[in-house]
Image (spheres, grey):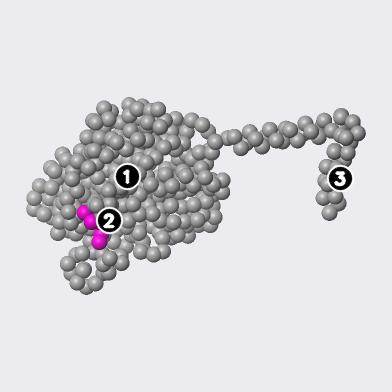
Amino acid sequence: MIYAILERLKVSIVFCFHARGFLCFSLRVKLRGENMTQTNQAQSNQVRNAVIIGTGFYAPEQVITNQYFNDLYKKDIDSFLRESRNIKERRWKKPEQRTSDLILPAAEQALKNAKITAQDLDLIIVATDTPDYLSPSTASVMQHRLQATNAGTFDINTACAGFVTACDMASKYIKADPNFKNILVVGAYAMSQWLNMDDYKIASLFADGAGAAVVQATTESNVGFLTSTMYTDGQYHDYMGIYAGGSAQMITHEVIDQKGHLLAFPKRIPPETNGIHWPQLTKKVLEPIGAKPQDVKCFFITQFNVQSIYETLDRLEVPRERAHYIMDRYGYTGSASIAMALADAANQHKLKKGDLVVMLGSGGGMSMVATSLRWGYDT
């Protein structure tokens, strides 16, 4: 109470003394006020951005080689997978493993590499179309399992474009709201339990895994997320997906007998789709920052079809080695594929602070997303 009165008196004395000409005392207070104003203004002028500070990934221990499918289907599956898809083997989870079981080690690795704890997290975003439950969110499961007691949570589903979309959302949360400093972004995929083993083209392609990244607030001007763009062509929403289990088709005995609850490709998406749109999206995120495809140090692209990646880089007139590939060891891990590739590249020390990076995600829907960023640390 006394302190409050003195503070109010001090303000009145300043004005009173200043009016009477005691400039010395008035000047001291005035200068102190100006310094505080300048400090506050300098702080407000610092541009807040978001940067990746740590990554991690997990692939299940069970290795499924191409030879497994040769033996299962009594035909040469291996040659096509190696030559056209760059897939030699993949990982499948154990039947008792959940998607959250795949996420946990990836998330713990990302937190360790970021040098923060789960209690430092303000938000957890999980991108997956193979969640633990239809409801509640897998992100809420992870908040409990990580003991990230201060973190909010939500899931997103843009199929295989999910991780890049979630990174874009995390960066925008941080840029827009000072309450968000550390966000865990996860891409996770447990598709092996939804595979129709009667269809060798589907069964031999898909795999399981999870990748994670910690996105943190920064005021450094030479690192962080720069631009992003999205593209969707909704006419392809019924071309590939899991079409039972939602409100459109409940799971019944009949649906299960007909294997309608499993991953399906009812229609054929034009094979040139990615090769057309990925170069366009790349240029769309680079043009606003005055960069060219040749300036990009590393591309992280959905690992569905290596030929589409080659076509994209060829059209951009960029060496094919500029992209990072993991499908040869891990198969196609959907919404986890770019997250896993990012962590794998970091583990191989391929990224340096300030490197220009482009991430391109593409998934069922047909949903696509691209983002550009300057890498935040030397790996």
- Disc 2 is placed on an element classified as helix
- Disc 3 is placed on an element classified as helix
Q: Amino acid at mark 3?
A: Leu
Q: Are marks 2 and 1 in contact (CB under 8 Å)?
A: no
Percent position of residue 123, x then y: 49, 52
Give the left or right position of residue 5, taking residue 219 as reference: right
Q: For mark 1, what is the residue? A: 231
Cα gap from disc 2 to disc 1, whole angstroms: 24 Å
Give the left or right position of residue 374, taking residue 60 as reference: right
Q: Nearer the viewer, mark 2 or mark 3?
A: 3
Q: Which residues are magenta?
A: 238-243
Q: Are marks 2 and 3 in contact (CB under 8 Å)?
A: no
Which residue is depicted at the point 32% across and 26% down?
Answer: 294
Cα gap from disc 2 to disc 3, whole angstroms: 70 Å
Q: For mark 2, what is the residue? A: 191
Prevailing secondary structure of the magenta residues: loop
63, 219: nearer the viewer = 219
271, 351: nearer the viewer = 271
Give the left or right position of residue 26, taking residue 289 as reference: right
Which residue is depicted at the point 28% across and 28% down?
Answer: 318
Q: Amino acid at mark 2?
A: Met
| Outermost right residue | 20
Which residue is depicted at the point 27% across and 43% down?
Answer: 303
- Neighbours of disc 1 within 10 Å: few (<14), some (14-19), many (20+): some
- Neighbours of disc 3 within 10 Å: few (<14), some (14-19), many (20+): few
| Mark 2 / mark 1, whichever is N-terminal | 2
Q: For mark 3, what is the residue? A: 9
**Quadrant the C terminus occupies:** top left
Above or below, 18 against 152 in this view is: above
Cα gap from disc 1 to disc 3, whole angstroms: 61 Å
